[in-house]
Structure formats: structure tokens, C-alpha cells
Amino acid sequence: MIKIYNKKESTTQNIYLFSEDDWEQEKSSHPNVELFFNGKKNEVFIKTQSDKFDFFIGIGKDSKGFEIQAIANKFANDYKKNLQAVPTSVHSKLRLNLTEEFVKGLFLGTYLYPFEKSHPFWQENFELHFENISEEEGKDLALKTEALCNGQFAGMEWLNKPANHKKVNQISDFLKSTADRYGLKYKSFNREESIKEGLGAFVAVNQGSSQEASFTILEYNCEKDNAKTFGLVGKCVLFDTGGISIKPSDNMHYMKSDMGGASAVIGALITASELKLPVNIIAILPITDNAVSENAYLPSDVVTAYNGKTIEVLNTDAEGRMTLADGLSYLSKNYKTDVLIDLATLTGSSVRMFGYTCGAYFSNNNDLKIKLEKSADKTNQRLWNLPLWDIWKDDFTSDVADFKNISMKPFGDCIIAGKFLEQFIEEHPNWAHLDIAGVAFGNVGYAKDKAATGYGVQLLLDLIENY
């Protein structure tokens, strides 16, 4: 449990935060430290004296909230072996909103896979003391931070698990227990039930698997009148071989990350539930893997999606848009939502376009675009808008079905995928598709190799809280 208090008592462990300008004014109070410290961003100096440990952390000049969070995150991870599990005073001139970002960063920086609360910050004797926040503000910040960690870490944990530790039944058991814990409605369709429901595009992907399907619906209801309802669909392909259109073996081990959209949805749903946010959330996770077998769907197959549209399969490695198509149409046809968002590690095209700096997004609503970009810039979980012009529809019109699942042209696949998904939102007026293939899984400070970044959780929460 995170403990944050308003105290002025002396502690053996202290954290001093200084901008470059603040350091110029204060350095005379810390003799000899100026030889080693200037307040530059991510600069850390440790001063020890007897049993006292002082950590000086530089935050640079005019750092934004997400930069403060990143500095704290890096500090917590880099110095986990130096920090003590004791009451710790934090001395800074940061306003409350920036103090919140610093505390979030400290605790988010404790993540390692597999996550255990082994970092000094999670030990019983650790507590943070601030002079510049009230007791009530401290209690509120502790609740917010712990809820964010619980949600984001849960999503990251599933994304990081190796394929043989995240089978359909394992993640389903986790989601059932999560629903029980937070009082969520839980419903799931196995393969046979999905066939009966008409989830033909989802079933096509799952039919080659030795694992059972689990088309999962989770509902959080705040029970408040006139609350906004958010529909979230997360791509949840637990491992993607590419199917019959099999991927190259190089780096295929990274395909355990193909549930990055689902991990963001899981994280946001858990945090929203813990904080009892005054909104309603309906989350759909079409859970399967994409496997190679004698039963796997084939290029040239024609399948019927939930909304009755037919899809000619040209490439079985374009499976994410198949599962999302049924997720979107099922949500749109069976629930009334104010906002509809899907998230997916969908295309290499978005990675080639933006690298690892931002996700691509598409939307049919200008107001939602503005809100998404505002939240993306605030959290540094950045997005860049791409068009949904009707001319792109020509590229996936089929001779033998309503649509092809890819274009045969060697460019613009992330746009084709977005336009394809638009055909399954049932004319929902407030929809966005987030292609987060380049940002959900990548280089992180806590791992030597690529791992879960936590992308999407804070973005969704900021959007939901401020909509």
C-alpha cells in the first residue's frame, strides 16, 4: 500500500528535486554538491553522511508533466539497489499536478517482469513525506498512483508473458477473477458459441488453433445517471504466427506482443474500476492465437462477419482486423456507447511510417480527434492522425465478397486497415482506431530486450476522465 503524508520531520533518506534555475538559487545551501550537480534533466547525485542518504535529482528547465514522470521512473529503476525502504522526505517546489506526475513515475519505475513488489518503494516501512501537499491530497495521490500501477502493470504483465504462459484459458481465468474482484459483468463465447452468435471473422482466425476461442465482454457500470459510456475493443491475439501466410522466423518471438491493444484496455479498465470513475465502460477482447494447422483458414477463403458483410481473405496474417471487425460490430449492434475506440498492434506499416515515436490513429469525429490528441500530448503517448478518405475503399473491394482483408498495393496498409474497420462500426458517429504497433512493445529501461511499454493506459484514462 502506498503511503504519502504531509510531514516535516527529519528522515534518513531524502529526495531533492531541482530545476536548473532553482539549483542556481539554492546551491549555496548544499556546499560541495555543486561540484557534481547542476539540476540538468535526469542528473542524479547521491550524498551520504553517516546513516543519511540524500538523492539530488535534476529536472532540467520547464519540464512538462510527462517529463517529470519519466525522470522519476528512470530514477526508481536505476537506483533500486541504492534506495532504502524507510520514510523518505521529498523536497521540491513543484506544483501539485507535477508532484502527482513525479509520484506516479516513482512507482511506475518499480516495474520488472515478472512483477513482484520487491522494490524498496513497495515495502511496509516506505512512505513519502511532503511539505507542500495536504494530508487529503496525499491520500488521494496514493490511491490514484496505486490504481494506475495495478492497472498498467497487469496489462504489461500479460504482454510480457511468453507464449506458453498466456494460453486462452489462463488469461480468461485472470479476466474472470478481475471481474469478480471489481464487480464487473463478464461474458465469454467459446468457438461453438461464437459460431452460433455469427462471429464469423473471429472464428475464422481461431479455427486453426488448438486452443478454445474466448470472445470476451467486460462491463464496468458506475451506476450514475447520465454517465458517458465508452466502448473499448482491444486486439487480443496472444501469439501471431501469421497463420498460413506465415511470418519470417527472424523476430517471430516478438509476436507474443500482439495483444498490446488488449493490454491497454485491461489496464485502463482495472484502474477505472479501482478509482470508481463516474463513467461506464464496455470492453471487448476477442481472445485467440493465430496458428498454423490443417484447420487454419486459407488465403482465398470467404467468411461472413458478425454484421453480415463478407470478407475475402487474401492474407491470413491480417488477422487482427478480422477479430476487431467482429468486436466492433458486436459492440455497436448490442450496446449504446457515446465513444467507440479500438486499439491494436495492427500493422508494420504504421511502424515504418512513425517508427517508435507515436501511434497512428483514425477517427470519423473531429471533436474526438481533438480530445485524443490533447490526451496523447499530455501523457506523451503520442498519436498522429491519418485520413479515412473513401478513395481507399476501392483498394479492398472484392470481386467475390464485400471486402478483401488487405490491399494488394505495397503501401498504405495501416490506412487500408483503418478504412476496413470503419465498415464494421455500424455508422457509429464517434469512433477512433488506434494502431499502436510501434509503441506498445519496445526498448524500455527495465529490460535488456524489447518489452511492454505500458502505452495506452494513461492515454485512455486521461481521455475518459476529461471527456
Image (cartoon, helix red, strand yellow):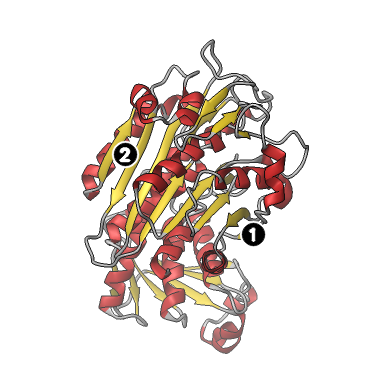
Residue at the (54%, 10%) spot, across then down: 294
Q: Secondary structure at mark 2?
A: helix
Where the C terminus falls, by quadrant? bottom left
* Horizontal side of residue 430 vs 3, given as left or right: right
Q: Nearer the viewer, residue 349 or 421?
A: 421
Lower position in the chain sequence, tag 1 or tag 2: 2
* Horizontal side of residue 416 vs 441, given as left or right: right
Q: Nearer the viewer, residue 180 or 222?
A: 222
Residue at the (55%, 19%) spot, across then down: 297
Query: What amino acid type is highlighted by mark number 2?
Result: Leu
Is label 1 or label 2 in front? 1
- Residue 154 in which image quadrant: top left
Q: Is residue 369 above or below residue 250?
A: below
Q: Residue furthest bottom?
A: 25
Residue 153, given in percent of the width and then of the height, sits at 41, 48
Residue 236, given in percent of the width and then of the height, sits at 47, 37
Q: Nearer the viewer, residue 58 or 211?
A: 211
Residue 356, given in percent of the width and then of the height, sits at 66, 51
- What mark, if any, has residue 156 been given in the picture? none
Crowding at label 2, few (<14), some or many (≥20) Cα neighbours within 10 Å?
A: some
Q: Is residue 367 above or below residue 21?
A: above
Residue at the (55%, 44%) spot, across then down: 423
Residue 361, given in percent of the width and then of the height, sits at 60, 55
| Residue at image mark 2 | 175
Q: Is residue 9 above or below residue 350?
A: below
- Residue 143 in which image quadrant: bottom left
The CA span between labels 1 and 2 is 32 Å
Q: Taking the image as drawn, is residue 61 in sight?
A: yes
| Residue at image mark 1 | 385
